[in-house]
Structure formats: C-alpha cells, structure tokens
Amino acid sequence: MRGSIKPYVVFYGADLHPKGIHNVALKTNFELMAQAEAAHQAVPAFNIDNLESALAVAQVMQETGSPVIVQTIPRTLRYGGTATYPALMRSLMADSATDYAIHLDHGSSLELAAACIRAGFTSVMFDGSLLPFAENIEKTRAVTAMARPLGISVEGELGTIGGKEEGDTDLESSYTKAEEAAEFVRKTDVTSLAIGVGTAHGVYKGTPHIRVDRIREIHAATDVQLVLHGASGLSDDILRSCIEAGICKINFATELRQAYTRGIRQALAADPNVFDPKLYMPAAIEEIKKVVRAKIEVCRGIRL
Ligand SMILES: [Zn+2]
C-alpha cells in the first residue's frame, strides 16, 4: 500500500516562489512522517491561529532546519479564511529550504477537504470518529478517493480523543481497537491514522492514562502512519514512549495558544500604556517559539 503513495505534485500557481522557482520545501505529511518514522522520531504538528503563531513556527523552522507540519482546524479557517494560512506559510517560508507540510486538522467534510486542497494544503484529515464505524469508513473513503490521486496525504481517525477541539461537546476518550484499526485502514486507504489511546484535547483535569501498549498493538496490526492528538500537557517521557511505540506525528495546539496569550498578558502588564501591536506581539511570538523548540526536541530526540 505504501509503495503506491504518489509524491505531491506541485500544480498550483501559488506554489511558485516569488522569484519564479518552485517552493520545493513544501511536502506532504506522508513524506515528512515516513522520514521521521525511519529515524524512530515523530514530526511535531503545530496548530496556528494567526500571523503571530505562523511567524513563530516559521522562525523556529528557519533557525533549526527541522521539518514540521503546520495545521489548522476548521474553526481557524472560518476565523481567518481557508486560503489565508497556506498563503501565509508559503510567503514566510519562501526563502527557506526547510521541509514543511500544510495540513487540515479535524476536517469535517469532503467539501472542506476539496477547498483546502484547492487552497494549497498538502494534507487533509477527515475526522469521522464520532460516526458509526461503517459510516466513518464510507466518508473517509470518499476523501481518500478524491485526495490520494492528487498526491495529497489523508489522515483518518478511529476511537475518540477526549476534550474539545472543533466541537463544543466535552468527550470522554475511548480506546481504538487494533483489529478495527486494521480494517479501517484497509477499507479507507488513509495514509495516516489518529488513534484514541487516552489523550484529550485542551487542558488535562487529572492525570491521563495513556495506553502505550495499545499504540504498540495498533502499530503491529496496521501498515499506516500513526498520529497522537491531545499531546499538550503530556510529559516528555510519555511522548517519547509513544514515539518508541510507533507514533510518528504528534499534534500540539493548546500549549501554543497558552503561550501566545501568556506573552501578550505579560507584555501588557509590563507596560500598561503600550498600544502598538508591533511592540507587544513579539513577546507572544517569543513565548510560542519556546514551546515549538521544546516540542521539536522531544519529537526528534535531539537538543537544538
Ligand atoms: Zn486533535
């Protein structure tokens, strides 16, 4: 199955470098995750919300040369515009040789996946985890049938990841079963799979019980790249165990949002008279960069 993965074909006008050359550093999730998995590492995936979070992630990528996945949830696209985020990243990364991918996180429909691909995303997720098993397969399959021939990676989800991400319901986590994961991957042809192993989105209220053994079982039963959601707030040791068990993409959203808001609060408190965003936003960017650097170190098993 993996042998049939097509490389991402650059065919959008927007992929042209301002100087007229292709932005060759723009890759798919599949390509970045395959490299990471071969090195027993994971690719960190950072959710961006605005110019400042995009700047923070782009600057760390340029400083470290470390590939990352930049992603947005549908709510972010409604906030800033679907075409805005890929255009922003292409512009910020135009002179960089560091590989990156632009991914739709928790996509909710075939139509949104198509709109994102048209806008220049190189990877899309369809999250049918709340649907009955057969319907999740059917709807995810429709996305892979549209996206895979274009060389676009597709992430599915099976089992539930607790907390709130896109919806307003506060979900309980449920654990993905290895046999169901194998059937799901076989029938949908996804390139990667988000699994429920006890993580939750948002801020953890108690100590989460992460089933590393379940990651290992699913990894043994499937030939698909495995994704961990809800990683904000998990210790570095737990994250390293998850990577060692077979996870090769880890999503971070909440900790970046917390860092952004903390930076603004501190800057405004330090100077109550400041009013120019260009004077207080750099503090928010610096706070996000610290989190991004730390997560890259954990996912790569390196010291930057
Ligand atoms: Zn998620």
Image (cartoon, rainbow, N blue to C red):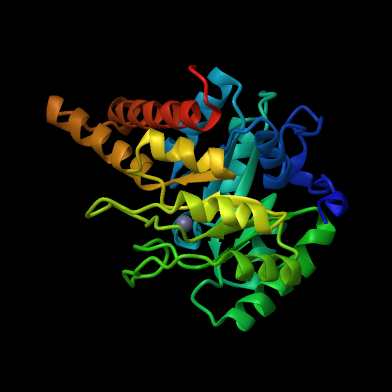
Q: Which quarter of the image is occupied by the N terminus? A: bottom right
Image-based side of 279 in relation to 25, left or right: left
Q: Quadrant of residue 94?
A: top right
Q: Nearer the viewer, residue 81 or 216?
A: 216
Q: Nearer the viewer, residue 152 or 137?
A: 137
Q: Give the answer, above or below, for where 168 lies relative to 222.
A: below
Task: Answer whether residue 82 is visible to the viewer in this image.
Answer: no
Q: Residue at x 51, y 33 (%)?
A: 299
Q: Nearer the viewer, residue 225 or 105?
A: 225
Q: Residue at x 61, y 21 (%)?
A: 65
Q: Quadrant of residue 145?
A: bottom right
Residue 44 position in % (x across, y down): 53, 38
Image-based side of 68 in relation to 97, left or right: left
Residue 285 position in % (x across, y down): 37, 30
Task: Answer whether residue 27 is visible to the viewer in this image.
Answer: yes
Q: Residue at x 13, y 31 (%)?
A: 269
Residue 239 position in % (x across, y down): 44, 39
Image-based side of 279 in relation to 88, left or right: left
Image-based side of 69 in relation to 24, left or right: left
Q: Quadrant of residue 21?
A: top right
Q: Nearer the viewer, residue 179 or 9?
A: 179
Q: Give the answer, above or below, for where 247 lies relative to 264.
A: below
Numbered-mark total: 0
Residue 97 position in % (x across, y down): 70, 24
